[in-house]
Image (cartoon, rainbow, N blue to C red):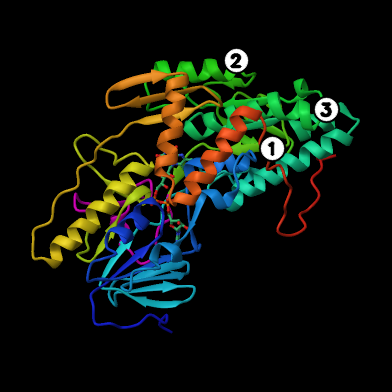
Amino acid sequence: MPVNIPETGQERIVIVGGGFGGLMMARKLAKSDYQVILIDKRNYHQFQPLFYQVAMAGLEPSSISFPFRKAFQDHKNMYFRVGKVNAVDTGRKQLETDIGIVNYDHLVLSYGAKTNFFGNKAIEERAFTIKSTTQALNLRNTLLTDYEKAVIERDFEKRQWFLDIVIVGGGPTGVEVAGALAEMKKYILPKDYKELDAKEVDIYLLQGTDQLLMGMDPKHGDTAERYLKQRGVIVKKNTRVVDYDGEYVITADDEKIKAGKLIWAAGVTCHRMEGLREDAFNKRNRIMVDEYSKVKGYDDIYALGDVACMETEDFPDGHPQVAQPAIQQGKQLARNFIRRAKGKDWVKFEYRDLGTMATVGRNKAVAEIGGMKFKGFFAWLVWLFVHLYALIGAKNKLIVFINWIWNYFTYDQSLRLIINPKDQADRNPPS
Ligand SMILES: Cc1cc2nc3c(=O)[nH]c(=O)nc-3n(C[C@H](O)[C@H](O)[C@H](O)COP(=O)(O)OP(=O)(O)OC[C@H]3O[C@@H](n4cnc5c(N)ncnc54)[C@H](O)[C@@H]3O)c2cc1C
């Protein structure tokens, strides 16, 4: 059954996924003559770089989310539908979704990436991830519930299970989570949970290679490591995690670390959309596109952002799976469709690398922007400014800014509420 969308006789562009890439593209096409349909399995855009602050009770999820319908309010050619796209029928030019069939003239796939567990089912089943708002909230609830349990637990070993945390993956996400947890241990635990000895909380950051923040200057990896160690995080490099039974994290060297929480931040992969040719995907399940974002083997299908792999001289394995390539590709593809409507030739995509950065709690960050490399307080200020600027929605920017100022001066986040959407299973150490 076709989804109820008006047939207006306009050419229809269907965008799957309203992340950085899809939403930017849709917004840029807002005043064009195309009929633009955005389909997303959620009804809001998520600002993923700040998920970890939701998980650490520093921000409310609503302040880093933006409802799609609000973005589409004033544009009569734009339509939004909540739906999960399951497959594409390229012959019929149709999408199969959980709300019905959607026809397209041009299809844009921007459905992002998912957590990569490298086939390890035991870890997938038990690890915490922060790849969605729901997962971030789940981690927040678990952290706070476990602190409550630890307060009443007399047995030291059991208390350790509630308190100790292992983070796997020393990229920006792992480093930021470790820094935020270390701050919670230092500033929040002694105030909120004064019966607990904060020294009992062990925070581990395990990295498979010999450097944190791979992709950045090794000196910045070392700086981040030093910052984390100063804050009491136990950093272990060249340490690959192979198993987790819910009680012990087991490494390739057979080391066993007792922890009731394993946070997995060790990489992403992509979902293979059913119906596309096998050779449209590369080994990492990214969709191969040319420099116009057109999918290999198709004239009417495009891909952008994390899910797309555009091999260029500077980026032979595709662009990094971060926000900027998605944003820039989304805008460029929209511009090209506008050029098409005017009978003009398309312009090739060229990536402008705006830099990378990572923060390690208050006052400390590392940044590499436009050939400049800096660290410490200034890098941290730049990190704050860049993230505020990139957030979608003026109200969100204001609320996040106020939260950050409040937290900075009071050393206290005020959102430590345990709000479960439904009763969750009681968590206890395996006996
Ligand atoms: C915790 C975390 C921290 C990060 N920090 C940074 C950072 O500091 N800086 C940075 O540059 N990047 C960061 N990133 C990466 C960045 O968020 C991504 O590169 C970026 O979001 C990619 O944009 P996208 O449009 O390709 O996909 P996404 O933003 O992932 O959007 C994909 C959209 O598709 C929707 N979707 C997925 N499957 C379907 C389906 N089958 N049907 C319908 N809809 C679907 C999803 O709901 C989502 O809205 C971070 C990512 C994470 C997870």
| Nearer to me, 237 or 174 | 174
The residue pinned by badge 1 equals 261
The residue at 59%/16% (across/down) is 229
The image position of residue 340, as x and y in percent, is 14, 64
Which amino acid, by three-letter code, is at mark 3?
Lys
Look at the image and say whether residue 290 sits in the magenta stretch.
Answer: yes
> What secondary structure is marked by label 2?
helix
Mark 2 vs 3, N-terminal side: 3
Q: Which secondary structure dominates the residues rendered in magenta?
A: loop
Point out the image quarter for the N terminus: bottom left
> What secondary structure is marked by label 3?
loop
Look at the image and say whether residue 269 sits in the magenta stretch.
Answer: no
| Nearer to me, 194 or 216 | 194
Q: Label 3 neighbourhood size at 10 Å, few (<14), some (14-19), many (20+)?
A: few
Classify 224 as above or below 55.
above
The residue pinned by badge 2 equals 230
Point out the image quarter for the C terminus: top right
Classify 240 as above or below 299.
above
